[in-house]
Image (cartoon, rainbow, N blue to C red):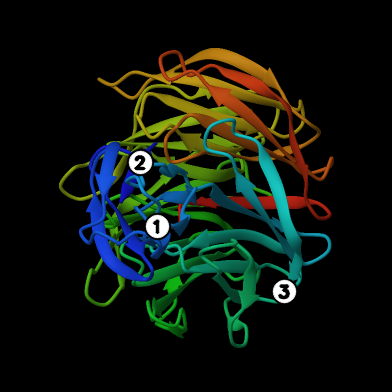
Amino acid sequence: MGGTVSGLSAGKTVTLLDNGGDAVVVNANGNFQFPTKLAQGKPYAATVGTRPSGENCTVTNGSGAVGTANVTTIAVACTPRPLFAYAVNSNDGTISAFTLDPSTGMPTAIGSSVPVGQGPLSLTIDPAGKFVYVANANDNTITTLSIDPNTGLLTVVGSPTATGMQPYSIARTPNGKFAYTANYGDNTLSAYSVNTGTGALTALAAITAGANPYTVTINSAGTYAYIVNANSGGTTGTAMAFAINSSTGAFTLAGTAINTGNTPEFIAVNPAGTYAYVSNAADNTIGVYSINAGTGALAASGSPVASGVNPFYISIAPSGGFLYVTNLLDNTVGVYSINSSNGALTLVQTVTTGTAPVTVLLNPAGTFAYVVNGVDNTISAYSVNGTTGLLTAVANGSAATGKIPRGMAIVAVP
């Protein structure tokens, strides 16, 4: 008794069961057969025992009774699991959940928005895809939520965790052991150890930052953290690099704070950890900085590059070849190619978005980009050309958020 498997990705396996047992492990598309033969008239019921990581598998023609001929019509079809995405809504203090179709890019809202704290601006997701952490700027807290791995729906876990004043940004290390907030109102970074089983946060010693820290970013290796200090009211801001102690989560300043443009609001690091990019909102530029491989320290690399009006959020393609920046006041996203030798940027496209684009994110495969439109209360999808980096709007590819959305995060649940 058996059938066929289709859609299974290379290197993955699916375990199939008959009548709750008689397991067969299938590691390639094609025919399969259960180990035990059933006599004529005996019932059978094929089900998925263990699905492949990142995929769902469905069974058709899976049950019945054995007839005079062998059963060969059981069909198992595997497809990629949808990604889950979450957007925080600063005006109504909620978080919205979405699925992202891996084939079409289409975002679809799921469930109702979940209340968090007041003025949520930023969020991060643990690497196992189990918990979401939301920084609430108006009540100085972090809300922790668990993710249902099957539906993507969120449930608040425990009580809010205290931060410094006005946490504008939150980030976590790639191993999920530590999390940090940039506290705009008291010029500090809050640090936390993370219980990877329960999601609980335990406060560690706070870290002194510069004036009005706006964003904290951690490199892909988890070895260095980078912040930008907006220095509200000044003519220049600063960027700082910190080495992260892998055992304690403590920060040690790497090099010295360096000047940026006027009102830096975001800093992003390329996947290789060799260059950082800063959006200077008040002078409409993007600063480029080299990263010292031994110390993590920053150094200016060339002159700042022109952006649109009021550049804000920066994302870098998983390939490291392209940079995307939202320009809040001219309702565009700028697309830049990145020179692999020196990190230099070249503008290749300017794309019209909704009103006040506050975030742009690429999915893990780099095939689709998503823009959060802060005034329209929507997220919009764009396909990404992997060779050129160019964006094309997905037809009817928008979904509604709550009021005044800000940060967004995407997760592929195993």
Q: Residue at x 48, y 44 (%)?
A: 267
Q: In the image, 330: left or right of 189?
A: right
N-term-proximal mark, 1 vs 2: 2
Closer to the chain start, of discs 3 and 1, is: 3
Between residues 410 and 310, which one lies in front from this camera angle?
Answer: 410
Residue mark closest to the camera, 1 vs 2: 2
Please tell me whether residue 38 is drawn above or below residue 366 in the rendered image: below
**Structural crowding at the residue carrying mark 2, measured as other residues with C-alpha within 10 Å and reported as few (<14), some (14–19) or many (≥20):** many
- Which secondary structure lies at badge 1? loop
Horizontal and vertical percent for residue 253?
Answer: 31, 61
Residue 414 — which label? 1
The percent position of residue 346, horizontal first and vertical second, equals 46, 14
The residue at which mark 3 appears reads as 117
Q: Quadrant of residue 39?
A: bottom left
From the viewer's perspective, is residue 269 above or below residue 243? above
Amino acid bearing label 3:
Gly
- The CA distance from mark 3 to mark 2 is 46 Å
Answer whether labels 3 and 2 touch (C-beta < 8 Å). Answer: no
Residue under numbered circle 2: 5
Report the front residue among 286 and 237. 286
Tell me the amino acid under the disc marked 2.
Answer: Val
Q: Residue at x 44, y 77 (%)?
A: 206
The residue shown at (53%, 32%) is 103
Label 3, label 1: how far apart the Cα atoms are: 28 Å
Whether residue 100 sits left or right of residue 76 in the image: it is right
Which is nearer the N-term, disc 3 or disc 2? Answer: 2
Q: What residue is drawn where x is 77% and y is 37%?
A: 356
